[in-house]
Image (cartoon, rainbow, N blue to C red):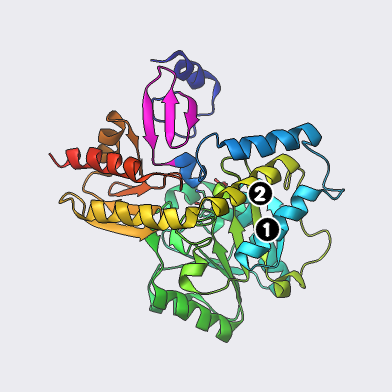
Amino acid sequence: MSEIIEREKKVFIQFFNRYPIVIERAKGCWIFDEDGRKYLDLIAGIACVSVGHSNEYVIERVREQAEKLIHVSNLFYTKPQVELAEKLAEISGMDRFFFTNSGTESVEAALKIARRVTSRKKFVSFTGDFHGRSMGALSVTWKEKFREPFMPLIEPVSFAEFNSLESLENAVDGETAAVIMEPVQGEAGVYPAKKEFMKRLFELKEEHDFLIIFDEVQTGFGRTGEWFAKDIYGFEPDIMTLAKAMGNGFPIGAVAVSEEVHSGIQKGDHGSTFGGNPLACSASLATIEYMEQNNLLENSRKMGERFRKGLEGFDFVQDVRGFGLMVGLSVSDAKGFSQFAMGRGVLVNATSERDVRIIPPLTISREEVDLALSVFEEFAH
Ligand code: PMP
């Protein structure tokens, strides 16, 4: 066993298991372990490293920023924060932003905002939804195994059955502060909301006057082939949560709100020491610019299609889902499949016994997609 793995076992809180690989460096879509073995990375730090590992454009901008200013209190104004918020407004159509350091924190802020501006308490989430592991975010996360040991969580929360109109209609009412939804469920194994389900949700909003929070932590920033999954559905949420790919691996997230929601927020409602840190903001701005300059939305759509077409041709694949480079598939033994691929130098993520997620850097090339597909093909034999 690697020395690093042995040392980790003694000093880390063992909340979860890791793959027995010690990563030393990475470039583009490739990861290198301490023994120099290389892997094609179709996990990308869980959908974070969208413009590729150690992207030179991002590195340069972060270096410039680090020489000027790494951190200062949010008691002061800084240019990178304002520039990033303006850029996000341009690509998202949302009006106002608050910066956080993770997806979970973005969700926490969103839940607080929803309660504040509606003066209601109840949240509605969905079977299969994942929103984070802190007490608030966990309250709207579905998995019983994650929730049960930590009860009581925030109440009241109702879980409607994902993609069931009847269950949704029964769950929402005039007491509902907000419905929080992943437009495409990520941790569950890439399960998109049906268009008619989304349409009904927005009709019910008119009836009961609740807010809609889209958790785009995983779907945001080109993952689905559009800037945001909301653009696929053509519906505008009141609140949106962001993180993951926003900084290409630098820890940064945001909660975005409409002007109307913003009018209900009071001074003093929320805050953060590190949120909007100039270094993270400069990484995020550079990431978005790089995506624009290199047509990565288009590459996400094209390479996603290539993956889906290839996977659909394999007999052992039972189902293929998703948009852009957010690709989900079902097989009879997801763990076995991911271990097989890893043994041949391709990293994919099994999200359940049957589901596998493919979420590579959006810079992935046609040759790299074909290489992955050729490894998957061997699994059939
Ligand atoms: N929301 C969604 C949709 C996510 O996929 C995740 C992370 N998998 C989170 C929230 C939590 O984000 P983080 O791990 O950055 O706190």
Looking at marks 2 and 1 on the same chain, the residue that comes earlier in the sequence is marked by 1
Tell me which segment is drawn in magenta: 23-43
Farthest residue in the top direction? Answer: 3
* Residue 281, position as x, y percentages in the image: 70, 46
Was residue 78 drawn as part of the magenta stretch in this picture? no
* Residue 337, position as x, y percentages in the image: 25, 40
> Callout 2, which amino acid?
Leu
Quadrant (top left/top right/bottom left/bottom right) for the N terminus? top left
Farthest residue in the right direction? Answer: 76
Residue drawn where x is 77% and y is 55% of the image: 82
- Disc 1 designates what residue? 87
Mark 2 surroundings: few (<14), some (14-19) or many (≥20) residues within 10 A: many
Per the image, label 2 sits on a secondary structure element best described as: helix
In which image quadrant can residue 321 be found?
bottom left
* Residue 361, position as x, y percentages in the image: 45, 44
Tell which of 372 and 193 is nearer to you: 372
Q: Is residue 96 visible?
A: yes
Q: Which mark is residue 285?
A: 2
Q: Magenta region, mostly helix, strand or loop?
A: strand
Instruction: Tell whether label 1 touches label 2 (CB within 8 Å).
Output: yes
Residue drawn where x is 47% and y is 64% of the image: 183
